[in-house]
Amino acid sequence: MSESAKAFTDRLRRCEATRGDKSGLSGKPVITVAAAGGSGNGMITCLLSMERWADHVRARKFDLIPVNRWSREYKLVTIREAARAMVREAPGTSD
């Protein structure tokens, strides 16, 4: 995870995790994307960190998507489709 993303998620976790079920993110669906460069090593470690963050703020993990340079093209389609599915599931939306 980049240094700035890590700082952001750490700060948000401190603000929201202590609020328990009153967290503004409690039950909200999230899609996390770990996009690794180079060899792709660390992609899964980053995704694991984001999954733990979602647990701490009590968000609902809608999807966790790893991306590397070899899977980029078809994973972009996956990310778009996951976002569309998440929006379709949102209250007050229809197809």
Image: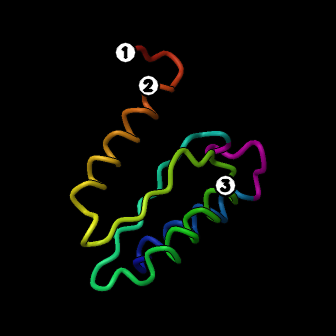
Cα–Cα gap, marks 3 and 2: 23 Å
Q: Earlier in the sequence, mark 2 or mark 1?
A: 2
Cα–Cα gap, marks 2 and 1: 7 Å
Q: What x and y, as percent, mark residue 69?
A: 25, 72
Cα–Cα gap, marks 1 and 3: 30 Å
Residue at the spot of label 3: 57
Q: Quadrant of the N terminus?
A: bottom left
Q: What x and y, as percent, mark residue 15?
A: 65, 59
- Magenta range: 18-26
Disc ID at residue 72 = none
Q: Residue at x 50, y 74 (%)?
A: 44
- Amino acid type at circle 3 is Val
Q: Earlier in the sequence, mark 1 or mark 3?
A: 3
Q: Nearer the viewer, residue 1 or 36?
A: 36
Determine whether label 2 and label 1 are within 8 Å by CB.
yes
Q: Quadrant of the C terminus?
A: top left
User: Which image quadrant is residue 4 in?
Assistant: bottom left
Residue at the spot of label 1: 95
Q: Is residue 19 rendered magenta in the image?
A: yes
Q: What x and y, as percent, mark residue 37?
A: 29, 79
Q: Residue furthest left?
A: 73
Q: What x and y, as percent, mark residue 90?
A: 50, 26
Q: Horizontal placement of 4 versus 15: left or right?
A: left
Q: Residue at x 43, y 75 (%)?
A: 43
Of marks 3 and 2, the one in the foreground = 2
Query: Mark 1, residues whose alpha carbon is within 10 Å: few (<14), some, or many (≥20)?
Result: few
Residue at the spot of label 2: 88
Q: What kind of element bears circle 3? A: loop
Q: What kind of element bears circle 2? A: helix
Q: Is residue 8 above or below residue 84?
A: below
Q: Is residue 56 above or below residue 28?
A: below
